[in-house]
Image: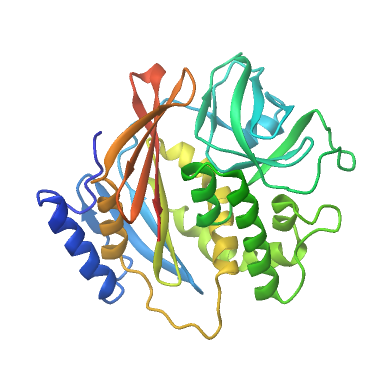
């Protein structure tokens, strides 16, 4: 794998030395750096932090290595009626059908609303043009329903406006592949949001639905404060290809794309999920030091040192996973582009 080499100063060191540096950095966080003095790290640049309350965003700048290659996002394709996500009556497998001449990129963690129960799609997935029905892995994020809901179709899913909103949920689905743990982490997320906002956030229509919780008025209004403050930070940037974020001073995750255009399409959905997680983890009496770029780049570099394994997701999509004791890296590759990478997702296991 071609690494991002986020910390060029340690890229030549042995893995043990790299982990020692990471441990010291996490124990003694340096003062926050000025945003305008972006850190050059290999072929990429990290700027930030851009802070609001307990959420810190770091922008990742770099070359658009997939210029000219465009994908529809799942949200776009559903809104334009260019894709059908079919209910199969199997909890952990749906079917997706691209009815358009364009290719569709699905990101792990995309929630689809409707069917017999709301689902989350497990892995990044490239859907070829005019694909016919293709099986796609999923987990249920609505434990209590197995019927049509309101005016929604029971045979298909109508929207995908949200992503999984916590790191624990992403780990349960994408890393541990455990349905029981996904249900458990949905309940935990709902409980934290209810406690933090001091109001119930579950819907009477389906109290186990994560999607309906994300649509809750109090959750939407409270997370909007983060979104209004942080959404504009990419507007004047021309070379942003991803972002990383920290909550309560701790690195959470990062998403980097070969296409800056694809990142910009996904930015509102990604930021919304980060904001909801920050909202759930907000504690008025909890003090913390804001995360620094050194911490973020150390975590990204640590993930790249892990042992690699591969999974063929479909005929078009391969996922390469690297894992260390503290961090994970999932790299999505497009088999139609000679294995060129499309997306890199970094997750802290801590």
Residue drawn at 25 percent across, 51 percent down: 301
Q: Quadrant of the N terminus?
A: top left
> Compared with residue 267, is residue 207 higher up or lower down, i.e. above or below?
below
Residue 265 visible in the displayed image: yes
In the image, farthest residue toward the right: 150
Residue drawn at 21 percent across, 52 percent down: 41
Q: Picture coordinates of residue 284 (x, y %)?
A: 56, 83
**Which of these two is toward me, 6 or 69?**
6
Q: Is residue 33 left or right of residue 275?
A: left
Residue 237 visible in the displayed image: no
**Which of these two is toward me, 294 or 259?**
294
Q: In this view, does 2 lie to the left or right of 67?
A: left
Q: Picture coordinates of residue 104 (x, y %)?
A: 56, 26
Q: Is residue 154 left or right of residue 36?
A: right
**Which of these two is toward me, 186 or 242?**
186
> Compared with residue 159, is residue 287 higher up or lower down, i.e. above or below?
below
Residue drawn at 61 percent across, 68 percent down: 225
Q: In this view, does 261 lie to the left or right of 48?
A: right
Q: Quadrant of the C terminus?
A: bottom left
**Which of these two is toward me, 137 or 163?**
137
> Compared with residue 298, is residue 82 higher up or lower down, i.e. above or below?
above
Q: Quadrant of residue 331?
A: top left
Q: Picture coordinates of residue 100 (x, y %)?
A: 64, 18
Residue drawn at 35 percent across, 44 percent down: 329
């Amino acid at each position: 794998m071609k690494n991002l080499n986020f910390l060029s100063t340690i890229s030549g060191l042995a893995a043990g030395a790299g982990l020692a540096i990471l441990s010291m950095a996490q124990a003694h966080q340096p003062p926050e750096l000025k945003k305008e003095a972006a850190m050059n790290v290999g072929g990429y640049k990290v700027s930030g932090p851009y802070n609001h309350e307990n959420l810190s965003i770091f922008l990742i700048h770099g070359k658009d290595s997939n210029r000219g290659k465009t994908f529809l996002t799942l949200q776009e394709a559903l809104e334009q009626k260019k894709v059908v996500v079919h209910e199969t009556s199997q909890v952990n497998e749906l079917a997706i059908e691209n009815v358009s001449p364009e290719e569709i990129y699905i990101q792990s963690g995309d929630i689809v609303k409707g069917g017999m129960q709301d689902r989350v799609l497990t892995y990044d997935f490239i859907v070829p043009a005019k694909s016919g029905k293709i099986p796609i892995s999923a987990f249920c994020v609505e434990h209590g329903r197995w019927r049509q809901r309101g005016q929604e179709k029971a045979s298909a899913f109508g929207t995908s406006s949200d992503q999984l909103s916590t790191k624990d949920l992403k780990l349960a689905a994408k890393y541990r592949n455990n349905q029981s743990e996904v249900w458990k982490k949905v309940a935990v997320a709902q409980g934290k949001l209810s406690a933090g906002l001091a109001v119930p956030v579950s819907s009477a229509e389906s109290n186990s639905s994560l999607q309906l919780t994300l649509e809750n008025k109090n959750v939407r209004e409270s997370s909007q404060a983060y979104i209004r403050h942080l959404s504009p930070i990419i507007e004047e940037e021309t070379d942003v290809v991803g972002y990383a974020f920290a909550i309560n001073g701790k690195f959470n995750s990062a998403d980097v794309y070969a296409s800056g255009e694809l990142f910009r399409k996904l930015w509102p959905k990604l930021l919304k999920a980060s904001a909801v997680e920050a909202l759930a983890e907000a504690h008025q009496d909890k003090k913390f030091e804001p995360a620094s770029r050194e911490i973020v780049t150390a975590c990204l570099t640590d993930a790249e040192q892990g042992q690699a394994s591969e999974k063929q997701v479909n005929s078009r999509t391969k996922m390469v996973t690297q894992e260390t004791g503290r961090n994970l890296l999932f790299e999505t590759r497009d088999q139609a582009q000679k294995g060129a990478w499309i997306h890199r997702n970094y997750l802290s296991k801590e």
